[in-house]
Amino acid sequence: MSSRKAVSNEQFKPADYRLLAEFRFLLRQFLVFSEEKAAEIGLSAQQHQALLAIKGHGDAMPTVGDLAQRLAIRPNSAVGLVDRLALAGYIVRRSDAQDRRRVTLALAKKGEAVLEKLTAAHRDELRRMAPLLKPLLAQLQK
């Protein structure tokens, strides 16, 4: 997490606070939904986020350091998370062919299967929430 200082001389109106409050409320609702869906499958929210970060990393397979950065956690915490996910059969570690010291992460079949279920549920929830979010985001662009 960055430590950005918000500096503004702008005077905010009650509507500005209502907009931000509603936006944060909807975000929190989504996070609670996400936590509950992950728990139903037997994962913590952080484990779900780790699987998603690994799968969504792009063409190159991520390292533990990449995962730590994506989850905004310390590298040693990411190592523990990776250890638990690997032990449970959700992910696999792979040695880099060019640099044997470098270890990359990939989803195992079990990880792919649970992530697919969670992604379908999350996509449906986002589609449900989209009509609530669109007007709020549009107001921010004014």
Image (cartoon, rainbow, N blue to C red):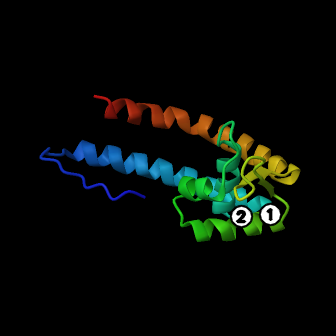
For disc 1, the marked residue is 86
Quadrant in which the C terminus is drawn: top left
Quadrant in which the N terminus is drawn: bottom left
Say left or right for 6 vs 135: left
Which image quadrant is residue 38 in? bottom right
Q: Residues within 10 Å of mark 2 (few under 14, many from 20)?
A: many
Indicate the position of residue 18 as horizontal and vertical percent values.
Answer: 31, 47
- For badge 1, the amino acid type reads Ala
Judging from the image, what secondary structure is the residue with disc 1 in?
Answer: helix
Indicate the position of residue 78 as horizontal and vertical percent values.
Answer: 63, 65
Say which of 30 and 109 sits in front.
109
Indicate the position of residue 42 as horizontal and vertical percent values.
Answer: 78, 64
Indicate the position of residue 71 as horizontal and vertical percent values.
Answer: 56, 57
> Relative to 54, is 84 above or below?
below
Q: CA distance from mark 1 to mark 2?
A: 6 Å
Give the label on residue 13, or none: none
**What residue lies at 73% left-to-right and 48% top-to-bottom?**
118
**What residue lies at 85% left-to-right and 61% top-to-bottom?**
89
For disc 2, the marked residue is 82
The answer to whether marks 1 and 2 mark residues whose Cβ atoms lie closer than 8 Å is yes
**What residue lies at 34% left-to-right and 47% top-to-bottom?**
20
Say left or right for 109 vs 19: right
Which image quadrant is residue 60 in? top right
Say left or right for 20 vs 6: right
Judging from the image, what secondary structure is the residue with disc 2 in?
Answer: helix
**What residue lies at 69% left-to-right and 49% top-to-bottom?**
54
